[in-house]
Amino acid sequence: NLKALFSFVEDEIVREKLQKSEHRIRKSYNELFSGYALKAEDVLNDVIHVDEYNGIVEMRNIQFYSMCEHHFAPFFGSCDIYYQPKTIITGLGKLVRLVKDVHSKRLQIQEIMTQDICKDMMRVLDAKGCYVRTQAKHLCICSRGPQDDVAETVCTYAEGTLKDKIFQ
């Protein structure tokens, strides 16, 4: 409940505007954490089957917003996906939805989100290889603790034929 969430505010909790905030917070959290209602299969579902694909598909600069499970503070940035299809190619918009609708709309840590996006690409699309890179600013670093609003975190994760590749 709102009183428990804002227990540090003490008497301020009775203010009328804060009383109305509970509904807005619930509505906001329903949207921010809507990724729990989706699986990778729900968005990587529009596919084209080919005999064999030997190239690499790159989707760069997918913007995302997420919430850190450690501090319940936002982090935001971009995601690059590189994958080498075997016989299944998915729509490019589906890669965006995997990042934005499924994974970033959950309580996350960036490292696990990066890994899970890659693993889903490999599993659902039966890709030969996948490499995922995320770059983000964490408000828990910017606004508390170290208070560094310039620092960014970069995480990478790769499997299959792209495991030993480095993309810039």
Image: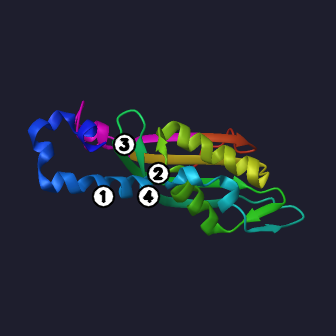
Q: Which mark is residue 65?
A: none
Horizontally, is 157 left or right of 46 in the view? left
Residue at the spot of label 4: 31
Q: Nearer the viewer, residue 147 or 164?
A: 147
Q: What's the magenta region?
A: 137-156
Question: Closer to the observer: label 2 or label 1?
Answer: 1
Q: Nearer the viewer, residue 6 or 73?
A: 6
What is the spatial separation of the Cα atoms under label 2 and label 3, in whole angstroms? 23 Å
Q: Which mark is residue 152?
A: 3
Sooner in the amino-acid sequence: mark 4 or mark 3: 4
Whether residue 88 appears in magenta in the rendering, the answer is: no
Sooner in the amino-acid sequence: mark 3 or mark 1: 1
Question: Closer to the observer: label 3 or label 1?
Answer: 1
What is the spatial separation of the Cα atoms under label 2 and label 1, in whole angstroms? 14 Å
Q: Are marks 2 and 3 in contact (CB under 8 Å)?
A: no
Q: Which mark is residue 24?
A: 1
